[in-house]
Amino acid sequence: MTKQNHAKLLVIDDDAHLRESLAEVLELDGFECSLAGTAQSGLDCAAKVNPDIVIMDIQLPDSSGFQICQELRKRSKTTILIMMTGRFLSLDEKKQGFALGADDYLTKPFDIVELSARIRQMLTRRKG
Amino acid sequence: MPSTTQRGRLAYKILLWFLIISLIPMGVAGLYLINISQASLHQQILGTEKSLAQSFAETVYKYIATYRDILEESAALPQFISGNKGMEDEYLKHLMSLHVAILELSVLDASGHEMIREGRFLGPNPQLRDMESEGFFDTALARGEFIGALKRFQGIYPTVTIAVSIGTPKSGQTPAGVLAAKISLNGLSSMLSMEFPPSSETSAAVASPDGFLIAHSDPEKVYKPDARLNSEILKILTTQVADSGGGEISLSSGQGFLSAYADVNGLDWIVYVQESIQAAYHTAARMRSQILRLLVWVIIAIIVLSLAVSRHITQPLRALKDAARKVGMGQFEDFPEVLTTNDEIGDLAQAFLSMSESLKEKTGELVDTKQELERLNRTLEKRVEARTRELKAAQEELIKKERLAAIGQMASVVGHEIRNPLAVINNSIYFIKTKLAPVLSQDPKVSKHVKIIESEIQQANGIINEILTYSRQRELQPETVRLNDWLEELLSVYPFPPHIALQKIFVPSNPPVEIDLTEMQQAVRNLIGNAIEVMPEKGILGVKTFLSEASMAAIEISDTGPGIPPETLEKIFAPFFTTKARGTGLGLAVVKKVIDRHGGKVEVASVVGRGTVFRLHIPISQKVEA
């Protein structure tokens, strides 16, 4: 794995194992990962780190992922926002998410290779 | 029966009123009339008795007066005034021979010495008496006449002494003497007994105020010593003030009499007539009884007449009653003959007939309505039964659905919760695989186990997807496609294993269908997947389209597998039912759910040892294809 990315990445999920495993896997691909377990700490972390990419669960203990998504999109137009979910989303939910600024959706469990490829593609497009 | 006790009651009422109305006034009037007639009759009878008594009193007076006159005429004769004894005696004998009632005649001189005495039963030379001390002598000498001194001749026969003065006292001279006669009063009794025979109910008597019985209509009562008038009657008579009178008297013996009396003019005698009450009022009583008998006959006649009238009046009413009873029992034919009289009862009969006519109609309608109602009731019952059955089925369906929904919800939650650990495992195995890449390339066994983990993650994820797909509430997103074209495309990308022979028969019309592509694809894939699974070595998989019923198209997927036994066949669409070692048991449940959601139906037919056929019937789209 080359470490050419050097992109900053924030994972917000209340499941510690999930966020850690995801972060460590993505670190293998050269991403710098920050972690947060709640919406509030996620927002704080995002303000400090200013990540390129935020991967967040839709359901968080203190807030909904959509609200963080909206907040983060307000702060930055360029940050890549990816929503994670363990369940099926209805079409309306998906539409709402996109309208609030989400860039993509992931259904757990997801293929790491595919995720990594998507992120890289989006980063490339943003730079270009 | 109560009807018998009621029958004729009206007739008797009418009768009773007839009687009350007619008889009471008549009875009152009748009794009043009887009383009036009785009173007047009594008055009349009493009047008759009074006049009898008065007339007899006159007779008595005349009787006595006759003898007095004779004596007075004799005393005025010259021989008496001159005192010629021989001629006097001769004349007295002559008088005696003329008048039988004269018992004795005497001529007294002015000093009271009896000068001549002639007697019917005295013999040729009777003893001469001195009469100066006798009361009658002084009276006759002083006043000219005397009537009185009642005695009984021979102790039995009543006599009266009449004495007149010889020579008139007008001249102021002293009379020369007195002519006295003893007169038998038997003639009075004879007259009375002729007038009132002893056998009759009427008797009459003449008495002096001291009770001396002078005469009586019954000779036995008077010709005896000391014959006296009944003292009670005498007492009543002597206390009367009027000269004459009468009335009813009752004696202490219990006898009642209608009696009348009259004083004899110039004498102090009393004539008394009496008749027993029964005899006196006999006529009146007979008249009363006749009137009463007449009254009874009238009453009987009125009763009979009013009975007849009331029966006549009530006959139509009774006929109406019979008719009404028949109507009450629901019979509208064969009414008894009702007299159609030209009065209120006739009107009533007419009204009754029209009423029963309308009642008959109404009853008919009622019966029809009742039958209709019963019929409707039966229909309603049937409908209710049918509805109940439907409801029960719906209820069962609902319970089933609720159960399925509950299962789905649980499956969704479980699936969702399992996805997180799966994601973590997936991440971790990726990490290990990446980190241990050199080791893995050297140790094939470790590499194999990593692959097993990855594969199982895939499978677990597949199961979860299946469950979530079945249980999620998703809106259909139908699209209109040509059935054959859509199916052809699906088959073209399906990875059929090489041992399966695919046999396609498509209907030429290639009907358009409106389907949710994702779900319908899932259903068909499930069926193809099952078919392949039951034919692990070789077999023919048939895919066919045809027009099943009106406006329905069908997809048929058949295999040549072992078939499904009948007892299993009925459960295969139930969720979580499976015969496989691995499987959720949701494949066919999803098929059924999807087809149901499209308004179609699933059929299955299977022969053990020959294979199974599934037919999915779905509606043909009526929309023109875009």
Image: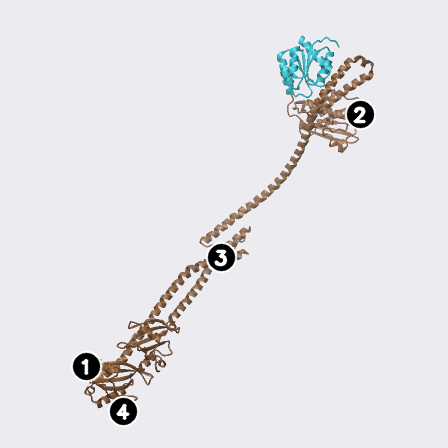
Chain colours: A cyan, B brown
Residue B131 placement (x, y as % from top left): 25, 85
The amino acid pointed to by label 4 is: Asn
**Could you say whether the residue bearing mark 2 is in a helix, strand or loop?**
loop
Nearest-to-viewer mark from 2 and 1: 1
Q: Earlier in the sequence, mark 2 or mark 1?
A: 1
The amino acid pointed to by label 3 is: Arg
Find out whether the residues at labels 2 and 1 contact each other: C-beta distance under 8 Å: no
Q: Earlier in the sequence, mark 2 or mark 4?
A: 4
Badge 2 crowding class, 10 Å Cα cut-off, few under 14, some 14 to 19, many 20 or more, is few
Instruction: Write down the quadrant of residue A15 in the picture.
Output: top right
Badge 3 crowding class, 10 Å Cα cut-off, few under 14, some 14 to 19, many 20 or more, is few
**Residues indicated by labels 2 and 1 sit on the same polypeptide chain:** yes
Find out whether the residues at labels 3 and 4 contact each other: C-beta distance under 8 Å: no
The image shows residue B4, relative to residue B188, as above or below, that is: above
Which residue matches tag 1? B169
Q: Tell me how far mark 3 sits from mark 4, CA to CA.
A: 102 Å
Q: Earlier in the sequence, mark 1 or mark 3?
A: 3
| Front-lying residue, B260 or B341 | B260
Residue B529 placement (x, y as % from top left): 75, 24
| Rendered image: mark on residue B125 | 4
| Front-lying residue, B551 or A64 | A64
Find out whether the residues at labels 4 and 1 contact each other: C-beta distance under 8 Å: no
Which residue matches tag 3? B9
In screen coordinates, is B327 left or right of A17?
left
Q: Earlier in the sequence, mark 4 or mark 1?
A: 4
| Rendered image: mark on residue B536 | 2
The amino acid pointed to by label 1 is: Pro
| Residue B600 seen in the current view | no
Residue B552 placement (x, y as % from top left): 68, 28
Q: Earlier in the sequence, mark 3 or mark 2?
A: 3
Q: Earlier in the sequence, mark 3 or mark 4?
A: 3
